[in-house]
């Protein structure tokens, strides 16, 4: 069986490919841990200067986390997601997200954490968790809101609707929208420019400075604990269970507000 994560190196550029096409590139715990390990390996080797994230093919970036393992695998999957997100946030050099098709849930967060987001015109973005009786984790909400503002984050998160590439560029969610045919060349040209025409130590310090000034969380520990408990409560509610069951059973959920 093909690995859920594939790494491809060309010069100073490493491409990480979400490779679960049969699952619309949704990542289970094993794939998420491998994703995080791959980023850490790239950093440790100190050969690459840019990472490109993409989905296999051009139909889906990633549809997020694969919850098909049910309750038995849920805790491990969330631990793996946290590990992969932290690996991305700690990577000191540029990450470019090449977004073709849907970037949903964790896929949206992967895009938001990336330093550059180039979208094909078939891309769609969203975190439709309210339609599953759940809520986006508060740190992901903060990251999205810092990027697109209050109006944009409310539009996406309170409705649970997906937005298209044109709306994404209006909100500032993506840097640029290009055709599906040209996206690979546009992305690789940017990666080569970043890796060959800029000094890696200067880029590293600049990225670190931007993160400390504008991206580091301002939530204090007391508020963070309160939000964590609230999110956990909602995501363990009867409605949350109904939402997941309905998704797995391919039916409309019946929410009861409890």
Image: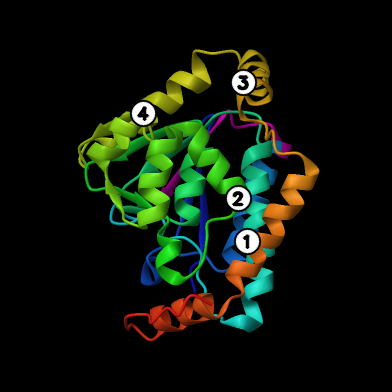
Whether residue 53 appears in magenta in the rendering, the answer is yes
Are circles 1 and 3 on residues that touch, CB within 8 Å?
A: no
Residue 210's tag is 3
Give whichever of discs 1 and 3 has the lower sequence position. 3
**CA–CA distance in space, label 1 to label 3:** 28 Å
Few, some or many residues within 10 Å of mark 1 (<14, 14–19, 20+): some
The boundaries of the magenta stretch are 44-55
Query: In the displayed image of the protein, which residue is found farthest to the front?
Result: 257
Q: Earlier in the sequence, mark 4 or mark 3?
A: 4
Contact, CB < 8 Å: mark 1 with mark 2? yes
Which badge, 4 or 1, is on the more N-terminal residue?
Answer: 4
| Distance (Cα) linking label 1 and label 2 | 8 Å
CA separation in Å, label 4 and label 3 = 17 Å
Mark identifier at residue 138? 2
Look at mark 1 in the image and give the residue it sits on.
Answer: 231
Q: Which residue is pictured at 63% across the width and 16% down the height? A: 206
Q: Nearer the viewer, mark 4 or mark 1?
A: 1
Secondary structure category for the residue under label 1? helix
Q: CB atoms at circles 4 and 3 under 8 Å apart? A: no
Give how far apart the Cα atoms at labels 4 and 2 are: 24 Å
Q: Is mark 2 on a helix, strand or loop?
A: helix
Which image quadrant: the C terminus? bottom right
Could you tell me which residue is drawn at 31 percent across and 48 percent down?
Answer: 100
User: For the residues carrying marks 3 and 2, which lies nearer the camera in this image?
Assistant: 2
Residue to which mark 4 is pinned: 175
The answer to whether 242 appears left or right of 21 in the picture is right
């Amino acid at each position: 069986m093909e690995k859920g994560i594939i790494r491809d190196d060309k010069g100073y550029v490493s491409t990480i490919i979400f490779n679960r096409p049969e699952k619309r590139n949704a990542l289970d715990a094993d794939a998420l841990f491998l994703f995080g390990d791959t980023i850490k390996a790239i950093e440790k080797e100190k050969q690459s200067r840019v990472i490109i994230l993409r989905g296999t093919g051009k139909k889906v970036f990633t549809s997020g986390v694969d919850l098909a393992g049910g309750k038995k695998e849920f805790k491990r999957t969330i631990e793996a997601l946290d590990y992969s997100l932290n690996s991305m946030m700690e990577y000191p050099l540029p990450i470019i997200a090449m977004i073709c098709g849907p970037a949903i849930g964790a896929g949206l967060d992967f895009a938001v954490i990336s330093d550059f987001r180039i979208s094909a015109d078939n891309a769609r973005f969203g975190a439709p968790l309210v339609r599953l009786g759940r809520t986006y984790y508060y740190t992901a909400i903060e990251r999205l809101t810092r990027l697109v503002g209050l109006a944009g984050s409310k539009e996406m998160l309170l409705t649970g609707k997906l937005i298209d590439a044109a709306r994404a560029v209006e909100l500032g969610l993506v840097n640029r929208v290009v055709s599906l045919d040209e996206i690979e060349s546009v992305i690789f040209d940017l990666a080569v420019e970043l890796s060959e025409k800029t000094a890696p130590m200067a880029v590293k310090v600049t990225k670190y400075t931007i993160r400390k000034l504008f991206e580091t969380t301002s939530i204090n520990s007391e508020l963070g604990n309160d939000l964590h408990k609230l999110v956990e409560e909602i995501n363990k509610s009867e409605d949350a269970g109904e939402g997941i069951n309905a998704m797995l059973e391919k039916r409309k959920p019946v929410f009861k507000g409890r």
